[in-house]
Image: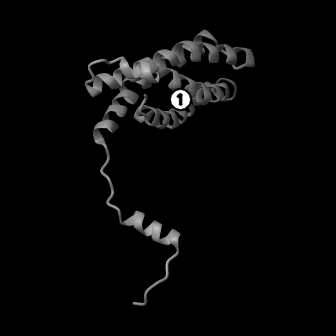
Amino acid sequence: MKDLKLSHFQKHFLKKLSKPIEPYDTASITKFAIYGTGIGGPLIALWYRFLDKKFPGCSLKIAVKKLAIDQLTFTAGLLVVFYTSMSIMDGKKDIFEECRQKFIPTYKTSCLFWIPAQLMNFILVPPIYRVIYIGTCSFVWINILCYLKRQKVE
């Protein structure tokens, strides 16, 4: 076969393809699955049921009220539960250390992501479809959390 002249991009791409595929970190995946399905998911479902009963309707005024209560109370608590439960599953001695280090940056990121998402949820999404909507948003958010969790804090 004739020698092919490859561009720099093609050589780089072929080099990437020839690298061995790293195995999945099943321990980490399991921990996130336990958190998502056994801890975070049920808490979120109960919380939104409570909010919808306590503040029925989808006017802008009610949506802003739900949003403020959600971000100022539940989200903060859920982040503490997330980092603490992950530290427990990791077997860390100080189960609050990572939470102390990462809470503020994670909370800020949460506000940037969830405030617009929840505003749409509370104004536009009918209650019957909120589980699907929040599930989709949560899938995106858990990937953001995975990224934030893996970041080293100095």
Left/right placement of residue 125 relative to residue 39 reads: right
Quadrant housing the C terminus: top left
Quadrant housing the N terminus: bottom left
Left/right placement of residue 4 relative to residue 130 reads: left
Q: Is residue 94 visible?
A: yes
Up-down relation of residue 77 to residue 92 (above or below): above
At label 1, counting other C-alpha atoms closer than 10 Å, the crowd grade (few under 14, some 14-19, many 20 or more) is: some
Question: Which residue is more in the foreground, 7 or 41?
Answer: 7
Left/right placement of residue 21 relative to residue 149 reads: left
Residue 14 spot, x, y in % from top left: 43, 69
Residue 43 spot, x, y in % from top left: 44, 19
Q: Secondary structure at mark 1?
A: helix
Q: Residue at x 62, y 30 (%)?
A: 117
Left/right placement of residue 61 relative to residue 89 reads: right
Residue 65 spot, x, y in % from top left: 67, 13
Q: Residue at x 63, y 15 (%)?
A: 68
Please give the residue where the numbered disc 1 appears in the rendered image.
131
Q: Quadrant of residue 39?
A: top left
Residue 35 spot, x, y in % from top left: 37, 27
Up-down relation of residue 130 to residue 66 (above or below): below
- Label 1 sits on what residue type? Val
Q: Quadrant of residue 124?
A: top right
Q: Is residue 43 visible?
A: no
Q: Residue at x 49, y 82 (%)?
A: 5
Up-down relation of residue 54 to residue 42 (above or below): above
